[in-house]
Amino acid sequence: MMIQHVTREISPAALEPCLRFYGMLGFTPVDAPDGVAGRAVWMELGPTQLHLLLDPAAPPISGHIALVVAPYEPTLERLRAAGHEVEPRREHWGAPRSYVRDPAGGLVELMAAPPGHA
């Protein structure tokens, strides 16, 4: 079993900055089904998708998503160079991890390795 996608409700104004942000993490836009065209933008990294659902009244994003990024340090440097504040966090399983907020305010945990793979 695996998680195939996560949906984030964002304001339309946050779309372009979010596309750039998630692009720095390796996600690329893919075609969304006709039924959601114009209401959602889909991005993909390997078998995992991120669906950005456009809503002018998008509520504040709660919770977070966690992504294993490789290479870890160069990814953090790209984010910092683009003006994103990356907050290092305590290692729980011997691998570095950090928090960063996407342009829509969603919390994203970045991990160098998943638990059990450090």
Image (cartoon, rainbow, N blue to C red):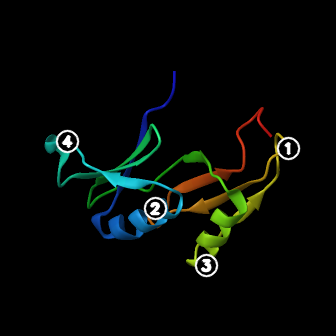
Under mark 1, the amino acid is: Gly
Q: Are marks 2 and 3 in contact (CB under 8 Å)?
A: no
Residue of label 3 = 81
Neighbourhood count class around disc 4 (C-alpha, 10 Å): few under 14, some 14–19, many 20 upward: few
In depth, the one of 72 and 56 nearer the eye is 72
User: x, y percentage for residue 61?
Assistant: 46, 53
Occupied quadrant, residue 4: top left
Q: Which of marks 2 and 4 is nearer the N terminus?
A: 2
Residue of label 4 = 33
Q: In which quarter of the image is the C terminus?
A: top right
Residue at point 40%, 70% (across, down): 17
Q: How far apart are marks 4 and 3 (CA)?
A: 34 Å
Neighbourhood count class around disc 2 (C-alpha, 10 Å): few under 14, some 14–19, many 20 upward: some
Under mark 2, the amino acid is: Gly
Neighbourhood count class around disc 1 (C-alpha, 10 Å): few under 14, some 14–19, many 20 upward: some
Determine whether, in the image, residue 20 is placed left or right of residue 53.
Answer: right
Q: Which of marks 2 and 1 is nearer the N terminus?
A: 2
Residue of label 2 = 23
Under mark 3, the amino acid is: Ala
Residue at point 82%, 48% (across, down): 91
Q: How far apart are marks 2 and 3 (CA)?
A: 14 Å
Under mark 4, the amino acid is: Pro
Q: In the rendered view, would you say 113 is above or below 4?
A: below
Residue of label 1 = 94
Q: Distance between the residues labelled 2 and 1?
A: 27 Å
